[in-house]
Structures are given as structure tokens and as C-alpha cells.
Amino acid sequence: MSTAAAPTVSEPSVTGRLPALDALRAIGAVAVVGHHVGFQTAVTMNTTWGGWLARLDVGVAIFFVLSGFLLFRPWALSAATGRARPRAKRYLWRRALRILPAYWLAIAVCLIVLPQNGQASVGDWIRHLTFTQIYQAGQLRAGLSQTWSLATEVVFYLILPLVAVLAVGRSWRPVRTIVIVSGSALLTAGWLTLMGFGWLDAALHTMWFPSYAAWFGTGMALAAAHVALRTGTAPAAFRVLDDLASAPVTCWAAAVGLMAIATTPVAGPRDLAEPTAAEFGVKLALYLVIAALILIPVAFGGPSRAKEVFGSSSARWLGAVSYGLFLWHPMVIELIYLVGDRQLFTGGLLSTFALTMAFGLVYAAVSYYGVERPLQLLGAQGRRRSTGCGRTPGTPVTDAAAPATTPPTVAAGTPVPTVGG
């Protein structure tokens, strides 16, 4: 007798997009803005509740788990449904087309416009343009401190095709796949162990990919479970994820509770002081569970009011421009302080946050409509040309590198590299 769980959602949703996930990118981006504004205004360090602002860098965990979920899902889906595996070359090309032009533009503007970068060297340009600014200490320039996490995520982009093929194997066995991708936790644990012995630098190596492998792996494991549930190939135990999704308020309340724990010293200092390996490990673990609890009600289960809200046109628009908000908001903060002749660690929290969001969204919209969206459309046209001839009419096309953000009028649900901290 089979113990596989029957599919809980109709077949079209198996290969369809998950538009409600767009809002998670917006939530992560706004959280990161709040984290940076809290530090810039010193509220993070000087108030009893500043720990909540300090831990808004949980937005990075949301981005990384979401990337693991959405980018790995096409590989799992192809194995579960017998479709052709995503092609690594096309996937990498579309990732590059998605992130590089807008990123390079932001790098150029920050290094040229901000006075603090007036002495930027050729090495500074090369490091930032090639995502290698995190591999030496003290190389992040003004307005570009958030790019450490994008440099980390790029490593995941590059290794994903190989990891996905190894994890999925020749036949679809979701439990095996989840066990394999869960091995990423061992990589992070080993990295933390080396840090604890003093063999790694807590100021430098906390930015490198192994520190966050468990976050990406969790997203991949959730993706495999999601596909298994939707195709009726999941063990009955996997239904707990759909059950959790049916109680979104409970999940999110639990996430807030864990966030409260993270605001305490157990997760490390609020300022730029180096955490111990144990503190860093606690923070990673808490953030991982928080991100999963936020994602599960939006990705799993059937239709719900929460998904309707998250899938609204306004929420999806914010998700669409969130990459630009990530790229430009630190420069906006620098300009606010420069134009207002403010000193670091001064200024009002709410006014600075409002100005940063307002001007950050303006820059983000210009980036999206002027750079990102035209290139997404160009990439989508290339995909249609390459797949249209050999496809049976009515068969949906799935692609690991589908457009990372799409306007509300276009199917959405693929990841944008909006990461920061």
C-alpha cells in the first residue's frame, strides 16, 4: 500500500508560477532598509528596542531561502514530471542577464558619484564588478556595503546546476533529494567549527558562502517537498507543510517569537563587533527557522486570504522593484546624510527611513523600467524562440532561469537576487 500523499492542488499549479512569493522579496528588501537606517541613526545601539532593528537583517535569510526554493524547483519539477532538465547554459545566461546590468550600473554610479569613493582604485572597480569584494577584508566601498550578500548569492547561482543534478539524480526520489540538499547544513556546521577554533576570521569569513549554505539548502529542501506534494509523490509525512500553511498566523507568530529571541545577546552584538562562532551559529539557526516559517504559508497549501494579499498587484510590484531598492538604498542613505550635512549616528529614524524608502523606490523604478524589465523581455523572447518550435501546444514551459521579477501583468514567482545586510 502506498504511503505517498495524494496531490493537494490541481495539476496546472504544479508547473505554474507562485506569484504570492513576490511579496516576500519586498518584505526582505524593506527589512534590510530598516536594518541599515537603524544602524545609521544609531537607534540600533542606543535604545532598548533597537535589537529589533538590528535583527532586520533577517531579510537576508528570507532572500537566500527563497532563492534556494525558486531556483531549485525547476530541477525537482523536471524529475518529478518527466520533463527535460533545465539547461545550465541558458540558466546561467539568464541569471547574468538578470543581475549584472543593473548591478554594474549601481557600482559605477556609487564609485563615481559618492565623494567617499573619490579615491577608488582600479582594484576597487575590478573587485566590485566581479563580486570578489568579500574575499579580502575592508574592500566594501561607500554605498556598496550591501553587495556582500549578492556576492555570496552569486556563488550559489554558479554551483546550483551541478548541485541540482547530483541532488535529483536519475530518478525522482524526493526523500533522497531532501537528504542530499540538507547536507548543506553540514557544510555550514563545519565552517562554524573552523571559526570556533580560530582558523577562520569572524570579520571576513562570515560573508562567504559556506556560512549560509544551510539557508540555501533549506530552500532547496522545501522546493523538493513542494514538488513532491503537488505531484502526489510525497510521503504522507510531508503533508505537515500544507497543514502549517493552513495556519499562517500561527507560523508568523512563531517567527516573531523567534525574532524576539534573536534580539537578545544570544545572537551576538548589535553593532559591528565580531560575534563569536557560537553567537553567529545561533543567529544563523534562528534566522533559518524564521525564514522558513515566513515562506511556508505563502508557498504551500491551497488558496488562502494570505496568498491573495501577497499576490496582489501592489505587493507584486514592490517585489518586482525590490532588486533596485536593494541596490540603491545605501547610496540614498549616503546622499541624505551628505546633502543634509549630517554626521553618522545622528538623525531621526522615521524621517530617515521615509526618505530612504521614497527615493529608494524612485531609483528602483527607474532601474526596473529602464534596465531590468527590457532585458527580462529580451531574455523571454529568446526563450520563446528556442523552445517554441519543439513544444507541444498547450504544454507549459518551465525554466530555472525564468525572469526574476515580472510586472503584475505577467506571470511571476521566480527569484530576484535582492539580498543585503
Image (spheres, grey):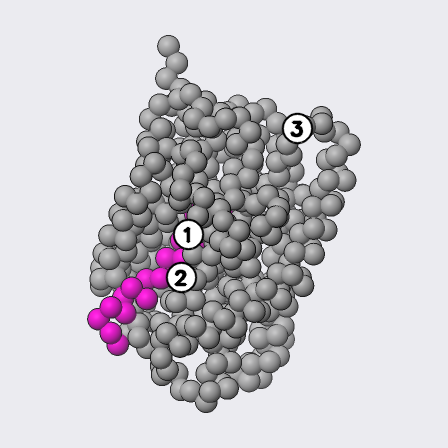
Q: Which residues are magenta?
A: 46-67
Q: Amino acid at mark 3?
A: Thr
Q: Are marks 1 and 2 in contact (CB under 8 Å)?
A: yes
- Between the residue at mark 3 and the residue at mark 2, the CA separation in whole angstroms equals 38 Å
* Residue drawn at (40%, 48%) of the image: 215
- The 10 Å Cα crowd at callout 2, few under 14, some 14 to 19, many 20 or more, is many
Name the element at disc 2.
Answer: helix
Q: Which numbered circle lies on residue 62?
A: 1
From the top left corner, tell me how far across and down residue 114 is, in percent. 56, 81
From the top left corner, tell me how far across and down residue 91 is, in percent. 63, 44
- Between the residue at mark 3 and the residue at mark 1, the CA separation in whole angstroms equals 32 Å
Q: Nearer the viewer, residue 334 or 168?
A: 334
Residue 121 in view, yes or no: no
Q: Which numbered circle lies on residue 395?
A: 3
Q: Nearer the viewer, residue 121 or 246?
A: 246
Q: Is 108 in the magenta?
A: no
From the top left corner, tell me how far across and down residue 311 is, in percent. 49, 46
Q: Nearer the viewer, residue 220 or 180?
A: 220
Q: Earlier in the sequence, mark 1 or mark 2?
A: 2
Which part of the image, by quadrant, shows the C terminus? Answer: bottom left
From the top left corner, tell me how far across and down residue 234 is, in percent. 42, 25
Identify the residue position indicated by label 2 in the image. 31
Q: Nearer the viewer, residue 236 or 285?
A: 236
